[in-house]
Amino acid sequence: DEMNDHALTGKDFEFDLAFPFTNELEETISHIKFAVPKVKHSEALADIDDHYEREEFMFRVVCHLDKQDMDAMALNDYLAIKPQVGAFFQLAGDYFRPVTSKL
């Protein structure tokens, strides 16, 4: 993204992939748009004990990717988007953070 003069800020949740790919269904994946996980995803996440598997699962859910799609994604794109997934959850968590007033 820096090469495209558009550095990731943690506030954008749509990304053009630097290395688009074609999945097993012959669909070209060139753009990722984050989606808010559903309750069913939270319940499925509770059944996953391994930290890395949990992280991968939530990455796939937020990015709307199947495991095979994620495996086909270029490492460069994955590493660029991965921290944005964390920022996405932090942004959602900020909504529930108590606000302290300064009087």
Image: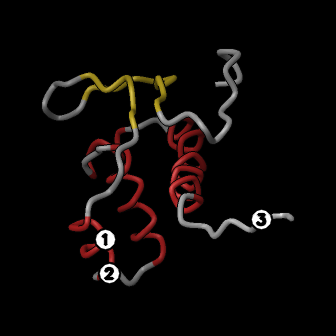
Q: Position of residue 92 (x, y in %)?
A: 51, 56
Between circles 2 and 3, the one closer to the viewer is 3
Circle 3: is it few (<14), some (14-19), or many (20+) Cα within 10 Å? few
Q: Cβ–Cβ below 8 Å for labels 2 and 1?
A: yes
Q: Going from the N terminus, do you reach mark 2 or mark 3 first? A: 2
- What is the distance, in whole Å, between disc 2 and disc 1 at their CAs? 6 Å
Question: What SS does tag 1 mark?
Answer: helix
Q: Cβ–Cβ below 8 Å for labels 1 and 3?
A: no
- Residue at the extreme front: 103
- Going by the numbered disc 2, the residue's amino acid type is Ala
- What is the distance, in whole Å, between disc 1 and disc 3 at their CAs? 32 Å
- Going by the numbered disc 1, the residue's amino acid type is Ser
Q: Nearer the viewer, residue 56 or 11?
A: 11
Q: Quadrant of the C terminus?
A: bottom right
- Residue at the extreme top: 4
At x 47%, y 23%, the residue is: 16
- Going by the numbered disc 3, the residue's amino acid type is Ser
At x 65%, y 33%, the residue is: 8
Question: What SS does tag 3 mark?
Answer: loop
Residue located beneath label 1 in the image: 42
* In the depicted structure, whether residue 63 falls above or below residue 47: above
Between circles 1 and 3, the one closer to the viewer is 3
At x 84%, y 64%, the residue is: 102
Q: Going from the N terminus, do you reach mark 1 or mark 3 first? A: 1
Q: Nearer the viewer, residue 43 or 91?
A: 91
Residue located beneath label 3 in the image: 101
* Colour scheme of the rendered structure: secondary structure
Residue located beneath label 2 in the image: 46
